[in-house]
Amino acid sequence: MRKVHTLSILAGFALAVSGCHGNTGSNTAADSPAVPGPIANSTVEPRDAAPQEVVAKPANADDKRPVLVCFGDSLTAGLGTGPGQSYPDYLQGDLDQLHYHYRVDNEGVSGNTTKDGVERLPDILALHPAVAVVEFGGNDGLRGLRIEDTRANLDEMVGTLKKAGIKVALAGITLPPDYGPDYIQRFNETYTLIAKKYGVPMLPFLLKDVYGVPGMMQRDETHATAKGNVVVARNVVPLVVPLLKR
């Protein structure tokens, strides 16, 4: 299911912890992630033991479950982890346990920018998903691309999906402090503005409770381990559950 290209999100950046979930477990458009700097010594404890590999059910013509597509870059693709160890894989298991009958489709491509996401929209629309979790922007920020372009691309992705009748949730990311407070603030505000414009739920920081926690991040300090992806999936569950039907 995963598509891994040769390009990946640039390694070695220090991410920041974001705010807490609301009462439903999802974040509102009014939230925005804080940027306190590196958190390698965080004392947050892992929320699970060693993850179990998830064996995803292959898609076939008889699978009538509605599709929940995870649409993003290497953080969605699960770069650096084994088969069945991306966050969408664990999300599938979590939703199955909660008796939500959806097929989670991992449409993460490593190295993708928001421009690449826009170009892939026809492929996503062809899947006819009921729900889409959109996770892009990290590569834009790390490459110093224009904030205006990132916003326009995210706007086009979310707007196009919504226009097609797809329920959308937005998963954000942030940047290291050395990019400067002004650029970081404008970058973070991108997710808030898009979420508010389209009235979609937002998770400001996909790697909440993962970045800086021993065993949760790979050596590149950019991508979650399999164990970290278990927590990422649990971050996403309350984001999408209000959009699902039993």
Image: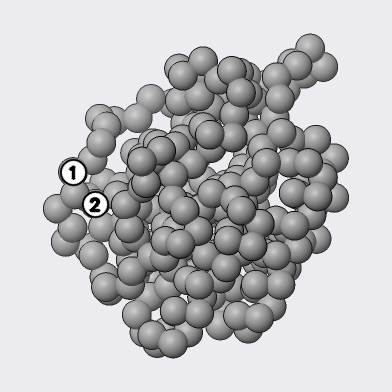
User: Which quadrant: the N terminus?
Assistant: top right
Q: Position of residue 37 (x, y in %)?
A: 27, 74
Quadrant of the image occupied by residue 235: top left
- The image shows residue 60 at horizontal and vertical percentages of 77, 18
Comparing 228 with 79, the one in front is: 228
Q: Residues within 10 Å of mark 1 (few under 14, many from 20)?
A: few
Which tag, 2 or 1, sits closer to the chain's start?
1
Q: Say what amino acid the circle numbered 1 marks.
A: Glu
Residue 55 visible in the current orientation: no
Q: Amino acid at mark 2?
A: Val
Identify residue for label 1. 45
Helix, strand or loop at label 1? It is: loop
The x and y percentages for residue 186 are: 50, 80
Q: Which mark is residue 102?
A: none
The C terminus sits in image quarter: top right
In this rendering, the answer to whether 246 lies above or below 171 is above
Against 104, residue 42 (above or below) is below
Residue 213's disc number: 2
Q: Is residue 79 visible?
A: yes
Where in the figure is residue 232, as x and y percent of width and height? 41, 43
Q: Residue 130 is drawn in which quadrant?
A: top right
Asked whether disc 2 touches disc 1, contact meaning CB atoms under 8 Å apart, the reply is yes
Left or right: 116 as drawn, with respect to 83: right
Q: How many marks?
A: 2
Q: Which of 5 and 173 lies nearest the eye of the viewer?
A: 173
* Left or right of 13 in this view: 243: right
* Foreground residue among 158 and 11: 158
| Residue 110 relative to residue 46: left or right | right
